[in-house]
Image (spheres, rainbow, N blue to C red):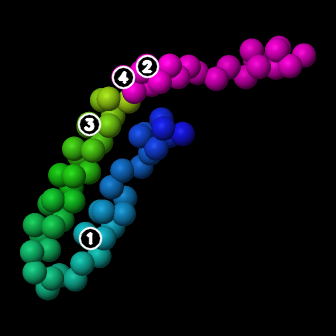
Amino acid sequence: MTIASWAGMRGVVTLAAALTLPAVFPQRSRLTCIAFVVIIVTLLLQGLTLPMLAKSLDVTAFDDKRDETQQA
């Protein structure tokens, strides 16, 4: 669950909210720029630290064939 939340979609709501602001909204371009920066930073930070998180939580890949063999 931790891995899924760490690797989940980032910034979709932020970007949608920033782009739906009316053109006459004060500081609209600045808010859109901030939204893009936040999205890029979270993608890089969380993307680059995901392998370390998986290693620290001792997460391994699920092997369907191994599980079927154990059930048999």
- Is 5 in front, or is 11? 5
Callout in the foreground (4, 1): 4
Cα–Cα span, label 1 and label 2: 37 Å
Q: Quadrant of the C terminus?
A: top right
Q: What residue is shown with label 4? A: 52
Cα–Cα span, label 2 and label 3: 16 Å
Give the left or right position of residue 48, taking residue 61 as reference.
left
Q: Position of residue 52 (x, y in %)?
A: 36, 22
Residue type pointed to by label 1: Leu
Residue 8 against residue 64 in the figure, above or below: below
Give the left or right position of residue 40, taking residue 47 as reference.
left
Q: Residues within 10 Å of mark 3 (few under 14, many from 20)?
A: few
Q: Position of residue 71 (x, y in %)?
A: 86, 19
Q: Are marks 4 and 1 in contact (CB under 8 Å)?
A: no
Farthest front residue in view: 57
Disc 3 is placed on an element classified as: helix
Counting residues from the start of the chain, the first of labels 4 and 1 encountered is: 1
Q: Residues within 10 Å of mark 1 (few under 14, many from 20)?
A: some
Q: What residue is shown with label 3? A: 45
Q: Residues within 10 Å of mark 2 (few under 14, many from 20)?
A: few
- Highlighted range, magenta: 51-72
Disc 4 is placed on an element classified as: helix
Name the chief secondary structure element in magenta. helix
Residue type pointed to by label 4: Met
Q: What residue is shown with label 1? A: 19
Q: Residue, x 36% and y 63% (percent of image)?
A: 13
Q: What residue is shown with label 2? A: 55
Q: Are marks 2 and 4 in contact (CB under 8 Å)?
A: yes
Q: Position of residue 26 (x, y in %)?
A: 10, 81
